[in-house]
Amino acid sequence: MRRVLFSTISLLAFAATTGMGLAADIPRPLPAKAPAMMVPFYNWTGPYLGINGGYGWGRSNWDGFASGNNSTSGGLIGVTAGYNWQVPGGPWVFGIEGDIDWSNMRGSFSNAFCAGCETRNSWLGTARGRIGYAMDRVMPYVTGGLAVGDIRANRPGFSGVSDTKAGWALGAGIEAAIAPNWTAKLEYLHVDLGSVGCSAAACGLPTNASFKADIVRAGLNFRF
Protein backbone atom coordinates (compact mmCIF):
# COMPACT_ATOMS: atom_id res chain seq x y z
CA MET A 1 0.00 0.00 0.00
CA ARG A 2 2.84 2.38 0.83
CA ARG A 3 4.46 1.62 -2.52
CA VAL A 4 1.25 2.46 -4.35
CA LEU A 5 0.89 5.67 -2.34
CA PHE A 6 4.50 6.74 -2.94
CA SER A 7 4.24 5.85 -6.62
CA THR A 8 1.05 7.94 -6.98
CA ILE A 9 2.62 10.95 -5.23
CA SER A 10 5.73 10.68 -7.43
CA LEU A 11 3.65 10.56 -10.61
CA LEU A 12 1.59 13.58 -9.52
CA ALA A 13 4.71 15.59 -8.68
CA PHE A 14 6.27 14.71 -12.04
CA ALA A 15 3.10 15.68 -13.93
CA ALA A 16 2.87 18.99 -12.09
CA THR A 17 6.52 19.81 -12.79
CA THR A 18 6.20 18.89 -16.46
CA GLY A 19 2.99 20.89 -16.82
CA MET A 20 4.60 23.99 -15.33
CA GLY A 21 7.48 23.70 -17.77
CA LEU A 22 5.14 23.36 -20.73
CA ALA A 23 3.07 26.32 -19.58
CA ALA A 24 6.21 28.42 -19.36
CA ASP A 25 7.02 27.54 -22.97
CA ILE A 26 3.59 28.71 -24.29
CA PRO A 27 4.05 32.18 -25.89
CA ARG A 28 2.07 34.92 -24.26
CA PRO A 29 -0.46 36.79 -26.44
CA LEU A 30 0.62 40.23 -27.62
CA PRO A 31 -1.25 43.17 -26.06
CA ALA A 32 -4.18 44.28 -28.20
CA LYS A 33 -3.62 47.46 -30.19
CA ALA A 34 -5.91 50.37 -29.48
CA PRO A 35 -8.26 51.01 -32.43
CA ALA A 36 -7.18 53.80 -34.76
CA MET A 37 -8.80 57.11 -33.90
CA MET A 38 -11.23 58.15 -36.64
CA VAL A 39 -11.50 61.90 -37.24
CA PRO A 40 -14.98 62.70 -38.59
CA PHE A 41 -15.25 64.57 -41.89
CA TYR A 42 -16.45 68.14 -41.72
CA ASN A 43 -20.17 68.54 -42.41
CA TRP A 44 -21.19 71.75 -44.22
CA THR A 45 -24.93 71.42 -43.62
CA GLY A 46 -26.58 74.23 -41.67
CA PRO A 47 -27.29 77.97 -41.51
CA TYR A 48 -24.67 80.70 -41.08
CA LEU A 49 -24.25 84.45 -40.60
CA GLY A 50 -21.20 86.51 -41.44
CA ILE A 51 -19.50 89.67 -42.60
CA ASN A 52 -17.79 90.42 -45.90
CA GLY A 53 -15.65 93.14 -47.38
CA GLY A 54 -13.67 93.79 -50.53
CA TYR A 55 -13.03 95.94 -53.57
CA GLY A 56 -14.77 96.37 -56.90
CA TRP A 57 -13.84 97.91 -60.24
CA GLY A 58 -15.70 98.24 -63.52
CA ARG A 59 -17.01 100.54 -66.25
CA SER A 60 -20.02 102.78 -66.81
CA ASN A 61 -21.16 103.93 -70.25
CA TRP A 62 -23.28 107.05 -70.89
CA ASP A 63 -24.64 106.35 -74.37
CA GLY A 64 -26.07 109.85 -74.91
CA PHE A 65 -22.73 111.60 -74.39
CA ALA A 66 -20.81 110.34 -77.41
CA SER A 67 -20.27 107.05 -75.61
CA GLY A 68 -18.83 108.67 -72.52
CA ASN A 69 -17.11 105.94 -70.49
CA ASN A 70 -15.80 106.07 -66.97
CA SER A 71 -13.93 103.56 -64.84
CA THR A 72 -15.61 102.91 -61.52
CA SER A 73 -13.92 101.52 -58.42
CA GLY A 74 -14.25 101.47 -54.65
CA GLY A 75 -14.67 99.41 -51.51
CA LEU A 76 -17.58 97.37 -50.16
CA ILE A 77 -18.47 96.04 -46.71
CA GLY A 78 -21.58 94.29 -45.44
CA VAL A 79 -23.32 91.27 -43.92
CA THR A 80 -24.05 87.77 -45.22
CA ALA A 81 -26.61 85.05 -44.42
CA GLY A 82 -27.02 81.62 -45.94
CA TYR A 83 -27.76 77.91 -45.65
CA ASN A 84 -25.81 74.89 -46.91
CA TRP A 85 -27.00 71.32 -47.48
CA GLN A 86 -24.38 68.61 -48.03
CA VAL A 87 -25.45 65.43 -49.79
CA PRO A 88 -25.24 62.64 -47.15
CA GLY A 89 -22.06 60.64 -47.67
CA GLY A 90 -20.99 62.75 -50.64
CA PRO A 91 -18.89 65.83 -51.38
CA TRP A 92 -21.53 67.98 -53.11
CA VAL A 93 -22.86 70.97 -51.21
CA PHE A 94 -25.88 73.01 -52.35
CA GLY A 95 -26.69 76.33 -50.74
CA ILE A 96 -28.39 79.69 -50.90
CA GLU A 97 -26.73 82.93 -49.84
CA GLY A 98 -27.75 86.55 -49.57
CA ASP A 99 -25.79 89.68 -48.70
CA ILE A 100 -26.22 93.43 -48.49
CA ASP A 101 -23.22 95.76 -48.76
CA TRP A 102 -22.52 99.44 -48.42
CA SER A 103 -20.62 100.39 -51.58
CA ASN A 104 -18.36 103.27 -52.58
CA MET A 105 -17.83 102.30 -56.22
CA ARG A 106 -17.76 105.43 -58.37
CA GLY A 107 -16.06 107.01 -61.37
CA SER A 108 -16.32 110.04 -63.62
CA PHE A 109 -15.40 111.09 -67.15
CA SER A 110 -14.92 114.30 -69.10
CA ASN A 111 -15.31 114.85 -72.82
CA ALA A 112 -16.63 117.52 -75.18
CA PHE A 113 -20.18 117.02 -73.91
CA CYS A 114 -19.61 116.77 -70.17
CA ALA A 115 -16.95 117.66 -67.62
CA GLY A 116 -17.11 115.51 -64.50
CA CYS A 117 -20.12 113.29 -65.27
CA GLU A 118 -20.17 110.68 -62.51
CA THR A 119 -21.64 107.20 -62.02
CA ARG A 120 -21.92 105.93 -58.46
CA ASN A 121 -23.13 102.83 -56.66
CA SER A 122 -23.83 103.29 -52.93
CA TRP A 123 -25.31 99.88 -52.01
CA LEU A 124 -25.34 96.41 -53.50
CA GLY A 125 -27.15 93.21 -52.55
CA THR A 126 -27.20 89.70 -54.02
CA ALA A 127 -29.32 86.56 -53.62
CA ARG A 128 -27.48 83.60 -55.09
CA GLY A 129 -27.36 79.86 -55.29
CA ARG A 130 -24.12 78.03 -54.57
CA ILE A 131 -22.77 74.65 -55.65
CA GLY A 132 -19.68 73.48 -53.79
CA TYR A 133 -17.42 70.43 -53.78
CA ALA A 134 -16.31 69.68 -50.23
CA MET A 135 -12.82 68.30 -49.66
CA ASP A 136 -13.28 67.84 -45.94
CA ARG A 137 -12.70 71.34 -44.50
CA VAL A 138 -12.07 73.10 -47.82
CA MET A 139 -14.81 73.79 -50.38
CA PRO A 140 -14.41 75.46 -53.78
CA TYR A 141 -17.73 76.61 -55.24
CA VAL A 142 -19.50 78.42 -58.07
CA THR A 143 -22.30 80.87 -57.45
CA GLY A 144 -24.84 82.93 -59.35
CA GLY A 145 -28.16 84.70 -59.08
CA LEU A 146 -29.84 88.06 -58.57
CA ALA A 147 -28.04 91.35 -57.96
CA VAL A 148 -29.81 94.51 -56.79
CA GLY A 149 -28.35 97.97 -56.21
CA ASP A 150 -28.61 101.63 -57.00
CA ILE A 151 -27.14 103.49 -59.96
CA ARG A 152 -26.62 107.24 -59.62
CA ALA A 153 -25.84 109.36 -62.66
CA ASN A 154 -24.78 112.92 -61.84
CA ARG A 155 -23.89 115.78 -64.19
CA PRO A 156 -22.54 118.98 -62.63
CA GLY A 157 -25.21 121.70 -62.69
CA PHE A 158 -28.08 119.25 -63.14
CA SER A 159 -30.20 117.21 -60.71
CA GLY A 160 -29.07 113.84 -62.06
CA VAL A 161 -30.89 110.59 -61.42
CA SER A 162 -30.78 107.73 -58.90
CA ASP A 163 -32.69 104.47 -59.23
CA THR A 164 -32.66 100.93 -57.84
CA LYS A 165 -31.93 98.37 -60.53
CA ALA A 166 -32.01 94.57 -60.64
CA GLY A 167 -29.46 92.55 -62.58
CA TRP A 168 -27.36 89.45 -62.16
CA ALA A 169 -24.22 88.21 -60.43
CA LEU A 170 -21.98 85.27 -61.34
CA GLY A 171 -18.74 84.08 -59.78
CA ALA A 172 -16.73 81.52 -57.85
CA GLY A 173 -14.86 81.20 -54.59
CA ILE A 174 -13.29 78.98 -52.00
CA GLU A 175 -14.32 78.54 -48.36
CA ALA A 176 -12.48 76.78 -45.53
CA ALA A 177 -13.33 75.77 -41.97
CA ILE A 178 -10.86 77.48 -39.63
CA ALA A 179 -12.50 76.54 -36.29
CA PRO A 180 -15.41 74.30 -35.19
CA ASN A 181 -18.06 76.95 -36.01
CA TRP A 182 -16.11 79.40 -38.17
CA THR A 183 -15.37 79.47 -41.89
CA ALA A 184 -13.48 81.98 -44.03
CA LYS A 185 -13.94 82.56 -47.75
CA LEU A 186 -12.45 84.38 -50.71
CA GLU A 187 -14.82 85.17 -53.58
CA TYR A 188 -14.98 86.75 -57.02
CA LEU A 189 -18.24 88.12 -58.49
CA HIS A 190 -19.10 89.79 -61.78
CA VAL A 191 -22.12 92.06 -61.30
CA ASP A 192 -24.26 93.68 -64.00
CA LEU A 193 -27.03 96.04 -62.85
CA GLY A 194 -28.04 97.15 -66.36
CA SER A 195 -28.54 100.90 -66.78
CA VAL A 196 -30.51 103.85 -65.45
CA GLY A 197 -32.22 106.33 -67.75
CA CYS A 198 -31.56 110.03 -67.27
CA SER A 199 -33.75 112.62 -69.00
CA ALA A 200 -32.57 115.81 -70.72
CA ALA A 201 -33.92 117.83 -67.78
CA ALA A 202 -31.92 115.78 -65.27
CA CYS A 203 -28.70 115.28 -67.24
CA GLY A 204 -28.70 117.94 -69.99
CA LEU A 205 -29.01 115.26 -72.66
CA PRO A 206 -31.11 112.08 -72.60
CA THR A 207 -28.84 109.17 -71.77
CA ASN A 208 -28.62 105.72 -70.24
CA ALA A 209 -25.84 105.17 -67.70
CA SER A 210 -24.84 101.53 -67.23
CA PHE A 211 -23.09 99.86 -64.30
CA LYS A 212 -20.97 96.71 -64.37
CA ALA A 213 -18.35 95.66 -61.83
CA ASP A 214 -15.89 92.93 -60.94
CA ILE A 215 -15.67 92.36 -57.19
CA VAL A 216 -13.17 90.48 -55.05
CA ARG A 217 -14.06 90.11 -51.39
CA ALA A 218 -13.31 88.07 -48.30
CA GLY A 219 -15.78 86.87 -45.71
CA LEU A 220 -15.97 85.37 -42.23
CA ASN A 221 -18.98 83.23 -41.32
CA PHE A 222 -20.30 81.73 -38.08
CA ARG A 223 -22.14 78.40 -38.57
CA PHE A 224 -24.98 77.40 -36.24
Image (cartoon, rainbow, N blue to C red):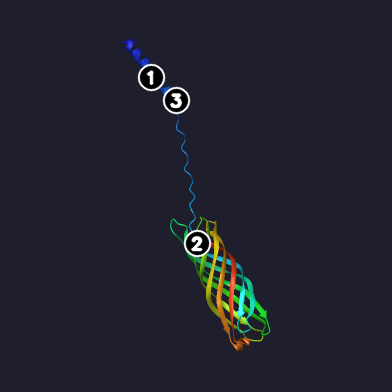
Compared with residue 52, is residue 134 higher up or lower down, i.e. above or below? above
Confirm or deny contact between disc 2 and disc 1 (CB under 8 A): no
The residue tagged 3 is 25
Query: Badge 1 local density, few (<14 within 10 Å), some, or many (20+)?
Result: few
Q: CA distance from mark 2 to mark 1?
A: 74 Å
Q: CA distance from mark 2 to mark 3?
A: 61 Å
Of the image marks 1 and 3, the number of the one nearer the N terminus: 1
Confirm or deny contact between disc 2 and disc 3 (CB under 8 A): no
Query: Badge 3 local density, few (<14 within 10 Å), some, or many (20+)?
Result: few
Of the image marks 2 and 3, the number of the one nearer the N terminus: 3
Which numbered disc covers residue 182? none
Percent position (x, y) of residue 32?
46, 37
Which numbered disc covers residue 132? 2
Image-based side of 6 in relation to 43, left or right: left
Percent position (x, y) of residue 46?
47, 62
- For badge 3, the amino acid type reads Asp
Which numbered disc covers residue 15? 1
Choose top left, top right, bottom left or bottom right for residue 5: top left
Query: Badge 2 local density, few (<14 within 10 Å), some, or many (20+)?
Result: many
Residue at 42 percent of width and 25 percent of height: 23
Nearer the observer, disc 1 or disc 3?
3
